[in-house]
Amino acid sequence: MTLPESVLAALRCQDCGFPLAEESAETLVCAGSGGHRVGREDGFLTFARPDAGKYDQAYAARYAALWAFGYQTLHSGLDETLYRAVTSLAAESLLALQAPLVLDAGCGVGRCATDCARMAPGSQVLALDASPAMLELARRLAHGGEPVAVELGAHGFAEPIVIAPRPAPNLILARGDVEHLPLADDALDLALSINMIDRLPGGPDLALAECYRVLKPGGRLLFSDPLNFTARDLWERFPDAGAILALLGDLGFTIETWFDDLCYRELLDSRRSFQEFNTLVVAARKPPAAP
Ligand SMILES: C[S@@+](CC[C@H](N)C(=O)[O-])C[C@H]1O[C@@H](n2cnc3c(N)ncnc32)[C@H](O)[C@@H]1O
Ligand SMILES: [Zn+2]
């Protein structure tokens, strides 16, 4: 399947943690004795099949189409403030690096991952998500080369919304679990966790610990989340931004910058109604190795 060498060197077997090697056009094989294999299914590597919850095909299409509609017609794109903030923080990191290895943990339809890949053509961006439907749309937009038309009559749109392709040959799509990344320790330059930790039933701890583990010393985490939890115990543990910043500090991260008042708006329909989220954005660094 001809993965770039830097990506192959960073990947690990989901089951036993051993390195992986290319076996055929469709499979990677693990160097351990268990005979584990990772297949390429529907255009993306499948390391694990975590529960994708509500992120089915219809949801994925609506998510991407409403975003594209905002982007194409409203200039601000409503939720663009969030993605512009994340992308400009990512640009700072990417510009300073030669051939960075980047992870978008919970990439959805690939909005930030594709931005990173297109901003830094010399990078390799691993875009990982639980949902095959989200990944499939990310694949069509980044690798398909054709506009994607989505019918949203039920949301008031008389005509299909056409999502423009955003070609990114250096984007590598993978199905896997953000709480158990198929990656080596100290492997990546930049990790993104964008609006996904409040989707995790067990809370953010494991996913953020995994980001720390896979970053190189000196590597950077870009995090955002509305902290719109759906369970009482998570609200109790993380009532505010301070609790997330404390967790990042406990994991070993140094906080570089943060703001908790970014207004993130998701478009709902053709009348331009939207829901608004107060979103925490953090840039943090894994401390560099001691000289
Ligand atoms: C609100 S979407 C955000 C997607 C993307 N980061 C963005 O900002 O457009 C949350 C994503 O997290 C993914 N997700 C939820 N639990 C996951 C898990 N355990 N491992 C990987 N992805 C997961 C969902 O499939 C969904 O695509
Ligand atoms: Zn293995």
Image: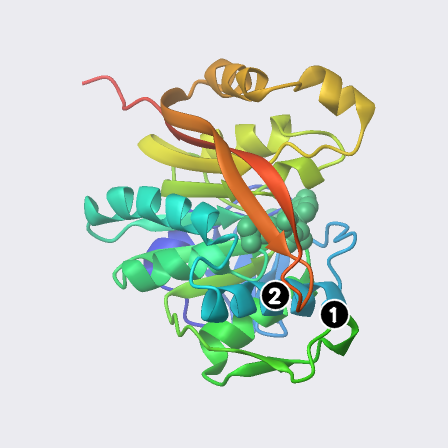
Point out residue 191 in the picture as x, y percentages from the top left corner. 43, 41
> Which color scheme is applied?
rainbow
The amino acid type found where label 1 is placed reads His
Residue at image location 46% in from the left, 72% down from the top: 142
Alpha-carbon span between mark 1 and mark 2: 10 Å
Quarter of the image where one finds residue 205: top right
Is the distance from the Cβ of mark 2 to the nearest ligand 1 atom less than 8 Å?
A: no
Circles 1, 2 touching at the beta carbon (< 8 Å): yes
Q: Quadrant of the C terminus?
A: top left
Residue at image location 27% in from the left, 58% down from the top: 120
User: What kind of element bears circle 1?
Assistant: helix
Vertical relation: 24 (above or below) 253: below
Vertical relation: 196 (above or below) 247: below
**What residue is pinned by disc 1?**
155
Residue at image location 63% in from the left, 30% down from the top: 204
Point out residue 137 in the picture as x, y percentages from the top left corner. 60, 70
| Mark number displayed over residue 66 | 2
Q: Mark 1, residues whose alpha carbon is within 10 Å: few (<14), some, or many (≥20)? A: few
Quarter of the image where one finds residue 42: bottom right
Mark toward the start of the polypeptide (1 vs 2): 2
Nearest the camera: 56 or 176? 56
